[in-house]
Image (cartoon, rainbow, N blue to C red):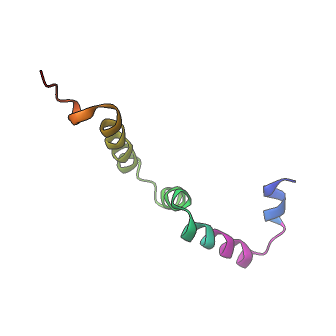
Amino acid sequence: MSIKTELGKLEKSALIEIISDLYKKNKSVQEYLNFYIKPDEDGLFEKYRLKFMKHFIPNGGSATI
């Protein structure tokens, strides 16, 4: 079974309902669709840069001796 084939069998209104439901229930889907509809590469980069810094570079990279 191919998801693309199965989704292709549905009417537009059914697809909209499925996507809307996924959007409401899943934060990852929200982020993906928001970026798909209105790409903001700089904003996305900054978001994950800050997460990286917080996780891998304690104290924002400031060295304490």
Residue lying at the far bottom in this picture: please name it.
Answer: 13
Q: Is residue 42 left or right of residue 62?
A: right
Q: In this view, does 5 lie to the left or right of 32?
A: right
In percent of width and height, residue 40 lies at 41, 52
In percent of width and height, residue 26 lies at 56, 63
Overall secondary structure of the magenta section: helix
Residue lying at the far front in this picture: please name it.
Answer: 65
Judge whether 10 appears above or below 53 on screen: below
Q: In which quarter of the image is residue 1?
A: bottom right
In the image, residue 59 lies in the stretch drawn in magenta:
no
The residue closer to the viewer here, 56 or 22, is 56
Residue at (31, 36) in percent of width and height: 53
Q: In this view, does 4 lie to the left or right of 31?
A: right
The residue closer to the viewer here, 62 or 64, is 64
Residue at (71, 79) in percent of width and height: 13
Q: In this view, does 8 lie to the left or right of 63?
A: right
Q: Quadrant of residue 45?
A: top left
In percent of width and height, residue 47 lies at 36, 47
In percent of width and height, residue 65 lies at 12, 20
Q: Start and end of the magenta stretch?
A: 9-19
Residue at (40, 48) in percent of width and height: 44
